[in-house]
Image: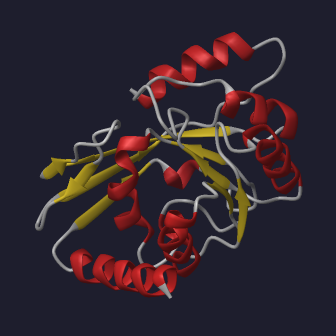
C-alpha cells in the first residue's frame, strides 16, 4: 500500500505541476524511431526529466520499450510505481553495492533484445557529475549507442541530497537537450568517455 499510494499520488502531482511548467525538447528529432538507445543524464536532473516524461516516455525518450535499472530497497517502491505509470515496462533490480554487476548484465540482455534504458552515470551515491564507466561497458557489450541528455530549468530549488537534485518551480521552463548518439567500441572507449563527459556538461 505504501508504494502504490505514494507512487500514484506522485504521478498525479506531476500531472498537476505540468499545468504550470513548460517543457522544451530539442535534438530528439535526430534519433531514429526504430532504434534503441541508452539515454544518459546526471542524477541531479531526475526530477526535471520526470516532467518531460508526463504523460509518457515517448516525449523525448523514444518509441521503443524501456527497461530501467532500479534500486532494490523497499523504500524505493513509490518510484517503481511512478515509473510504471509513466511507461517503463521492465525493471532490473540492482545498483552499485546491491548486485550491481548482475543487474548490469541483465540490463545488457534487454538492450540486445531492443529495449532502451535511462542511466544516471554518477548514481546512486555520487560523487555528483562524475562519470562512472559502467554505462560505457553496457554500451560496448550491447552495441547500443549512448545518447547524452542535458536537462535544465529556468526556476528551480536544489535539495540537500548528495546530488543536490533540481526541483522545478511553478511557471518554470524546462529545457531538454538531446545530444548525438555515441557509439562505444574497444578502440574508441577512452575517446567515448571524454565525449560523453563533455556532452553531459
Q: Is residue 169 left or right of residue 141?
A: left
Q: State the residue in front, 41 or 163.
A: 163
Q: Is residue 32 above or below residue 99?
A: below
The quarter of the picture where the C terminus appears is top left
Q: Is residue 7 above or below residue 92?
A: below
Q: Residue at x 49, y 68 (%)?
A: 79
Q: State the residue in front, 196 or 14.
A: 14
Relative image position of residue 72 (x, y in whole percent): 64, 58
Q: Residue at x 34, y 85 (%)?
A: 12
Relative image position of residue 114 (x, y in whole percent): 83, 59
Q: Residue at x 68, y 11 (%)?
A: 190
Relative image position of residue 6 (x, y in whole percent): 40, 81
Q: Is residue 59 left or right of residue 30?
A: left
Total numbered circles = 0
Q: State which quadrant residue 50 falls in.
A: bottom left
Q: Residue at x 34, y 57 (%)?
A: 47
Relative image position of residue 111 (x, y in whole percent): 81, 52
Q: Is residue 85 left or right of residue 162?
A: right
Q: State which quadrant residue 132 falls in.
A: top right
* Colour treatment of the image: secondary structure
Q: Is residue 134 visible?
A: yes
Q: Is residue 150 visible?
A: no
Q: Is residue 181 above or below residue 110?
A: above
Q: State the residue in front, 155 or 12.
A: 12
Amino acid at each position: 500500500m505504501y508504494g502504490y499510494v505514494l507512487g500514484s499520488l506522485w504521478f498525479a502531482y506531476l500531472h498537476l505541476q505540468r499545468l504550470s511548467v513548460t517543457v522544451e525538447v530539442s535534438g530528439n528529432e535526430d534519433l531514429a524511431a526504430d532504434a534503441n538507445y541508452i539515454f544518459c543524464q546526471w542524477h541531479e536532473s531526475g526530477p526535471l526529466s520526470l516532467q518531460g516524461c508526463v504523460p509518457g516516455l515517448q516525449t523525448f525518450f523514444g518509441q521503443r520499450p524501456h527497461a530501467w535499472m532500479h534500486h532494490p530497497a523497499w523504500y524505493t517502491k513509490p518510484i517503481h510505481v511512478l515509473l510504471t505509470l509513466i511507461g517503463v515496462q521492465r525493471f532490473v533490480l540492482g545498483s552499485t553495492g546491491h548486485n550491481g554487476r548482475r543487474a548490469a548484465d541483465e540490463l545488457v540482455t534487454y538492450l540486445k533484445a531492443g529495449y532502451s534504458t535511462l542511466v544516471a552515470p554518477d548514481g546512486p551515491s555520487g560523487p555528483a557529475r562524475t562519470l562512472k564507466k559502467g554505462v560505457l561497458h553496457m554500451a560496448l557489450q550491447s552495441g547500443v549507442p549512448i545518447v547524452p541528455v542535458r536537462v535544465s530549468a529556468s526556476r528551480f530549488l536544489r535539495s540537500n541530497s548528495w546530488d543536490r537534485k533540481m526541483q522545478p518551480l511553478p511557471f518554470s521552463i524546462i529545457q531538454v537537450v538531446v545530444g548525438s548518439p555515441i557509439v562505444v567500441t574497444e578502440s574508441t572507449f577512452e575517446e567515448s568517455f571524454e565525449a560523453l563527459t563533455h556532452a553531459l556538461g
